[in-house]
Image (spheres, grey):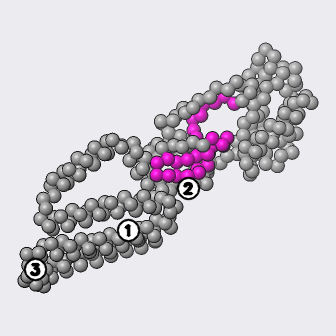
Amino acid sequence: MEKTTVISRIWWIVLTGLILIVLVFFLTKIVSIVPVVYKPFTGDIQALLFGVILYIALRLILKTLQNYLERRVQKKYVRPLVFIISLIGYFVILLAVLALLGVDLSSIILGSAFAGAIVGLAAQQILSNFFSGVLLIWTRPFAPGEYIEFNSWQYSYMLPSYPPKYLSRDEFRWKIAGTVEDISMNFTTIVENDGTVTKIPNSIIIQGAITVNPVRNKIQVRTEMLNSVDYDGLKKRIESIASRMKEIKDFATSVEEIGRETYLVKITLTTEGGDSEAVRARFMEDLLAARKNI
């Protein structure tokens, strides 16, 4: 409803400006209200009046857009958007005034197109990130403060890690998961679960698959035990730890690998409520204490 109101207001401003332009043309050309002394300058007067009318209409449109954008996005993003629109508007006004003054616009338009092509090729990636940022800010597929999981073909196996199995999880980082801290005109900043700050170009963000506020209720823990440790006894210890933590609703254990002296146990926890990383840390602390008594 609000967007429809803004569009209708802009249309009324444009329509009013066109009516004033037609009125100026009618008075200066048909009715000829310009004094005889200034007849040679009729075209200049007409161009000046047209320019003033278009300038006033543009300022009203920019003000309306600015008020609308400030209610949708953060104020720091409004200024560059309004600035770009104003540059385009002023360029159009300049062309209209020059055309009324009888200037041949073909060379100007050709030169502008050539210069625009050169700048566009030179700053292709920068402009791609910028307009992608405009799209993200305008459409708002996610907002700062939301938790997202991001994956794209550019980063399908990004930053693979191979930690030793007996110390940590071994995995490919096939996605970037974390809380969106900021969406600028060029980069989207994500704070991952371990505190890592990742800045992704906006042109990459709009091409990827994004899951907003996914359900995070599965936790995996791996621990290495000596072969002399009874597995059934270990399961009972794990059940005792899990039952004491109200956030854990279910658990499952399995033996992943068996070595000459040790075996690797995977524990999958199903949680409900609370910070999954905090729950995992508490569980591992209790498990570490329990291992000493096994």
* Picture disc at residue 62: 1
Label 2 vs label 3: CA separation? 59 Å
Residue 14: which quarter of the image? bottom left
Label 1: element kind: helix
Q: Is the residue marked by circle 1 packed among few (<14), some (14-19), or many (20+) residues within 10 Å?
A: some
Q: Residue furthest top?
A: 260
Callout 2 crowding tier (Cα within 10 Å): few <14, some 14–19, many ≥20: some
**Residue 129 location, x and y as percent?**
43, 47
Q: Which residue is mark 2?
A: 143
Whole-percent x, y for residue 1 in the image: 46, 71
Helix, strand or loop at disc 3? helix
Residue at x 84%, y 33% (from the top left corner): 288
**Residue 38: numbered disc:** 3
Q: Residue furthest right?
A: 293
Q: Which quadrant is home to the C terminus?
A: top right
Residue 181 vs residue 234, the one in the foreground: 181
Q: Secondary structure at mark 2?
A: loop
- From the viewer's perspective, tell me whether residue 221 is left or right of residue 95: right
What residue lies at 75% left-to-right and 25% top-to-bottom?
166
Viewed as shown, does residue 264 lie left or right of 144? right
Residue 177 visible somewhere in the drawing: no
**Front residue (pair 92, 73):** 92
Q: Which contiguous range is marked in magenta?
A: 169-196
| 182 falls in the magenta region | yes
> Type of residue at label 3?
Tyr
| Callout 1–callout 2 Cβ contact below 8 Å | no
Answer with mark 1 or mark 2, whichever residue precedes in sequence. 1
User: In x, y percent, where is residue 174?
Assistant: 57, 35
Residue lying farthest to the front in this orientation: 37
